[in-house]
Amino acid sequence: MPLKREAGWYKDAIIYQVHVRAFNDSNGDGIGDFQGLAQKLDYVQELGVNAIWLMPFFPSPLRDDGYDISDYRSVHPNYGTLEDFKTFLLSAHERGIRVIIEMIVNHTSDQHRWFQESRSSPDNPKRDWYVWSDTDTAYRGTRIIFLDTEMSNWAWDPISKSYYWHRFFSHQPDLNYDNPAVCEEMWNVMKFWLELGVDGFRLDAVPYLIEREGTNCENLPETHAIIRELRKKVDDQFPGAMLLAEANQWPADLRPYFGNGDEFHMAFHFPLMPRMYMGLRLEDRKPITEILQQTPEIPASCQWCLFLRNHDELTLEMVTDIERDYMYDIYAQDKIMRLNLGIRRRLAPLLDNDRRRIELMNGMLMSLPGTPVIYYGDEIGMGDNIYLGDRNGVRTPMQWSGGWNGGFSVADPESLYSPPILNPVFGYQTVNVLSQKRNEHSLLSWMRHIIGIRRSTPVFGRGSIEFLFAANHRVLAYVRQLGKETVLVVNNLSSAAQAVELDLRRYKGNILIEMFGKNVFPRVGDLPYLLTVGPYQFFWFRLRHI
Amino acid sequence: MAEETLLTDDFLRQLINVGEVDILVGLPTHNNAKTIEPVLRAVQAGILKCFPRERVVIINADGGSKDGTPELVTGTSIDDVWRASKVYALRTLHAITTQYALGPEPGTALRMILAAADLLRARACVVLSPDSTAMEPDWLQRLVGPVYSDKFDMVSPIYSRQKFEGVLMRNLLYPMTRAIYGYRIREPYASEFAISGRLATDFVTSEVWNDEWGRSGAEICLTVTAITGKYRVSQSFLGTKTQADRSASDLVAAMRRTVGALFSSLDSNFPLWSTITDSQSVPTLGTQSELAPEPVRVDCERLREMFATGVAQLEPVFRSILSAATLCELQRIANLEISEFNYPADVWAKTVFEFAASYHKSIISRDHIVQALVPLYRGRTLSFLLENSDDHGDDIERSVESLCGEFERLKPYLLEVWADRK
């Protein structure tokens, strides 16, 4: 039974991003699977999250970790069967956990039946399902995204003796959304999964659906028209289902993806993420407040999706050159850590495994306007392996215990899909769920606590935000408000204790209740409210007029 | 009763908000509204261009301006600069201002700036003149760079000047400082310089501030402290220094701040300077820029009159300060027509040294001694301008170098009068 899809459920969600392959192996073949994931749903529930976002699990040659789909209506045999998926989905819903799946709409694998047919002959009915050309000169104004591997957005197909268009790897041909049959078939695919009960889709690479000469082939009006059409069908036939946009764009370019509340329900706020890291290292709120001030208002039914890390590199596409240089110098001095325009590292290693900074970043993630996403393993401070190729270094097996393969699989270690983290700082013997569950002061325990507070306070998911520009620029303070509920958030971005005076006169008469310890702080008066905040410390205060 | 504090509570509150910085830019001001904006623009552009990642604060110590100078400092947004330059500021740039109630006192302003640098643990502190309208953004790099990146403790400027500008520096402060302390620092009394956090801390906590001359001539005391404390000193060519027109009364005040402080420094540093017999160059960065000569804007006849009148009217004072031979020579020069006027370098060096020795012995009030030097300095100024009437650039530098040679050659004479004069 699907969970009842209340309108706007995603605003109160805390999403846990999981790769089936990396989470838990139930059959001992060295690869995570749906039965294994289902076995760990109690853990997910105890963590406190109420939604799971699954990375691609469809049949695929796995040349891009599943983002190269060869069959949209099935499950990759490595991960189980469609029945296994249905069982997992049911178990998740029984625990009140919604399930969001990936939908890679822009392109398929070159092994997909559609592409095989398309390349077979210019006369094949599927020929126009992809973007073909006799030359590689069209759409010259289009940037190349995978700079480290691709020289062009066109690739020569020796079978059909013509060029096909691809925005990502050359083995991922772009679908031709000028062809109504493609739009119709993609809707049929989505409908298939919605009828099974999934609660929403993360639509991958949506800005690139349409190509037009003389443009950069991104964010085109025709692309928005296709999204509006999909959204209408979702609303009409599966009300409450959610569409989440992956569009790595500037806020002003992202805004149209919400339309008038008739395109995406949610979109990732890509530019904010690197600026949180930047603000932390600069010990200066400026990058964060600036990007949020530049972020346009979105329709009431819509929501930003916030994250600290994900399965990709920490993207630095949405920063200026000087900011990118700074981020590389600070967070990726070793060039092996860099990939494309980004940094392929996990949260804990990025922050030097500093518990205070990890907590502060999660505190901001949970308290800034939007729905937070937690990348699997970051809740226990998992490390990465920068010596694995591409982005595989941040996709290593989940570390459940200090035992065999970190509790991920009973297979021989050599047969695991990826070597687990073994180093003495981040290895599974040191960092694992089992040991952290036994320690009430562990990062995992702390994450459960903050998630619990966040979920108990709708103001974080739905409230307005107003920045308090205290004279001390090392302190990022803001007020979240929803109805009569008001929460004051004070973050110290500095490695040193700070004194800060906050202008809270409009809240005169309120007392402040610190939300983690429930302690009462002095009443707000006419004078600036003086707080001292420890290194990387943050406060959440509920304001009460008593 | 509580002890009077240098920093006001409000200023302290602002400093707390700024926190630790890498670079502190100090702007001492007093009614500089007409010139402060281009200076601020140059500073901000320099920060964006040369130090985009560093934590920088601009601190304005104002001596009670009535023309809105502090408001201009705090109201000038760096956003306008980065939009124009397309260079993005990573960090918050604080510009804070504090006023001290005692009126314009360069020493007080400098002390507040250095105290702030100490509190904020600045790695480099640069002080800039609010009337340097020719300032270029690169000045910041040239001054701060050697301190910030190359571990120098003090960077002194070298300017391209018209020959009628910087005459006190060329004829007295530079030759005297060089001969006494043995370092060839072209601007020992600079309104623009950079120092390390270490030197800022040491200087602001030194005994200099307990001395009236130290307070009023803090800049030259800072240079002397850097030399005598064996700090690493360098110089940077900055370019053109425009000089605001100053009245005659400004000269007396300037002499008090500079010559008085320099003379005063000789007392406590005698064991050091008395053993120095020559001078050494200091590392100098950059290259001198050529300056198109401008016509001399000096009334030479007026200078001659002021010199002759001074020599005549102050004869009783001079009898207690100068040797008979020197006074006699001055009286001879005072009778010369302008066409044959010449105040030779050796006579000028002896004059200065005899004044320094008298100052040391406090033959009369020290302030009167410094004031009495003013008309004689005017005579030397006239002689310098006449000697170099057709010279430019390198010629003038050779003339200055020759004068420095005389000061160094006659240093034993200073030691002699220092010990003998009653």
Image: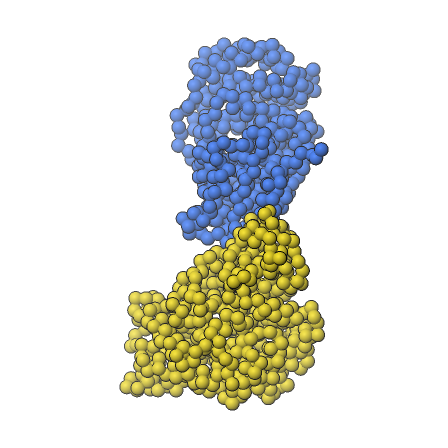
Chain colours: A yellow, B blue
In the depicted structure, whether residue B105 falls above or below residue B137: above
Looking at the picture, tell me which residue is in the foreground, B410 or A171. A171
Left or right of A320, for residue B112? right
The mark tally for this picture is 0
Left or right of B256, for residue B297? left
In the depicted structure, whether residue B397 falls above or below residue A537: above
x%, y% of residue A515?
63, 63
x%, y% of residue A231?
39, 75
Does the rendering let one see residue A368?
A: no
Does the rendering let one see residue A521?
A: yes
Judged from this view, the residue extending furthest toward the front is: A546
Looking at the picture, tell me which residue is in the foreground, B257 or A435. A435
Question: What residue is drawn where x is 48% and y is 49%?
Answer: B48
| Residue A115 placement: quadrant | bottom left
x%, y% of residue A408?
62, 81
Looking at the picture, tell me which residue is in the foreground, A52 or A217. A52
| Residue B302 placement: quadrant | top left
In the depicted structure, whether residue A321 falls above or below residue A198: above
Question: What residue is drawn where x is 47% and y is 17%?
Answer: B303
Question: What residue is drawn where x is 47% and y is 37%?
Answer: B36
Q: Which quarter shows the C terminus of chain A?
A: bottom right
x%, y% of residue B383?
48, 19
Left or right of A19, for residue A431? right
Looking at the picture, tell me which residue is in the foreground, B110 or B307. B110
Question: What residue is drawn where x is 37% and y is 76%?
Answer: A232
